[in-house]
Image: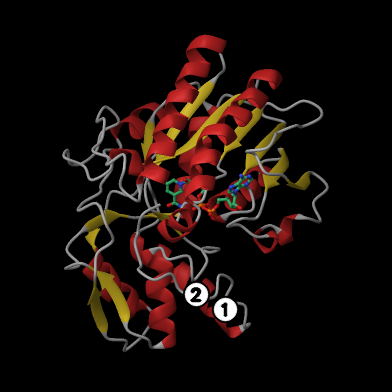
Amino acid sequence: MPHRPFQRAVVTGGAGFLGSHLCERLLHRGIEVLCLDNFITGSRSNVAHLIADERFRLIHCDVTTAVQVHGPVDLVLHFASPASPADYLRLPIHTLKVGSIGTLHALDLAREKRARFVLASTSEVYGDPLEHPQRESYWGNVNPVGPRSVYDEAKRFAEALTTAYRASHGVDTAIVRIFNTFGPRMRPGDGRAIPTFIRQALSGEPITVTGDGRQTRSICYVDDTVDGVLALAGGRHPGPVNIGGTEEVTMLDLAMHVRGLAGSRSPIDLVDSPVDDPRMRRPDTAVAREALGWAPKVPCSEGLQRTIAWFEERLAAGRPRGGAPGPVPSIGA
Ligand code: NAD
């Protein structure tokens, strides 16, 4: 992380998929970590391997209620929010509350502690984009009353609030717009496309691809996303900055790729598309490259292989956390 010698970080949503990787990486860099989570979609098992480290503390906390931390804090990474469509459609009001009230509390903490604040925003702020690839200057095409709006609009509000705290209260804020990220610790049943495809491929079930399968996404391996988030945290840039993979794939190709890498003979079934599912997604990463010196390094195939290997180990150990599949796989995040 350039520029900033952080000593004590708060990670909200730290027991989730991305949050747990962030906690791990911060500890590796010698930074003390307070992980705040209410476990609504995350799990203690994601950070169980960190508990023995005396610089790590796991605190059960719902950030929509309050965020209170004793002692100094110089970095707040606000990652608490359901992120899989299956989760946010099941938790619509909670998703709106964590994006609004939860963000307010996390910003208040950063203000009180004079800490750098990083908001985990999302490519979903671009909605079903009319501009391709998506630059940070694009305002998006979001249906405010569609089912996905609970997530998209919560994140758009969170961006507005973060910007207002910067302008009105002088908080040192940054906004990262994360595109579809995958890797170990995703729940096999969380409804997102990659864990769903892997679970289906490994169990020999049909792999379910939505719509005609020609919709595209650009996927990024978790290690690269974490590098991007920490590069932003460690600098002065306010964002928004896109962090995401630049290899754009159709969902059908992705399903076939996963099937091949998993050595599976699962058939591929086309199923109904979710409402307002974006047709295409690819970040323009010029800002990340120029301002942060960031570019993804892990090729998709390698990231998928690592993820499949992790799922295989979990299944072999009989610990397929997340259990039942979501009804319709979607790659939204
Ligand atoms: P996740 O569901 O695995 O993690 C979210 C974590 O937040 C969970 O541990 C959950 O228990 C916690 N949480 C939710 N509400 C909370 C609350 N009120 N108080 C405390 N903790 C709460 O999802 P993820 O994929 O790790 O996503 C993490 C963040 O990154 C989210 O803000 C998401 O919007 C953003 N993001 C992720 C992706 C991606 O591809 N994974 C893409 C774009 C943005």
Q: Amino acid at mark 1?
A: Glu
Query: Which mark, by number, is residue 93?
Result: none
Q: Position of residue 31 (x, y in %)?
A: 71, 38
Q: Is mark 1 within 8 Å of ligand 1?
A: no
Q: Residue at x 34, y 55 (%)?
A: 219
Q: Position of residue 298 (x, y in %)?
A: 40, 56
Q: Position of residue 234 (x, y in %)?
A: 55, 29
Q: Residue at x 37, y 86 (%)?
A: 205
Q: Amino acid at mark 2?
A: Ala
Q: Secondary structure at mark 1?
A: helix
Q: Where 304 falls versus 284 (above or below)?
A: below
Q: Where 188 falls versus 1 (above or below)?
A: below
| Relative to 131, 201 lies left or right | right
Q: Which residue is mark 1?
A: 313
Q: Indicate the quadrant where residue 108 lies.
A: top right
Query: Which mark, by number, is residue 309?
Result: 2
Q: Position of residue 125 (x, y in %)?
A: 34, 38
Q: Residue at x 30, y 75 (%)?
A: 208
| Relative to 188, 19 lies left or right | right
Residues 165 and 276: in front is 276
Asked if labels 2 and 1 touch by Cβ distance under 8 angstroms, the answer is: yes
Specify the quadrant that holds the N terminus.
top right
Counting the numbered discs, the total is 2
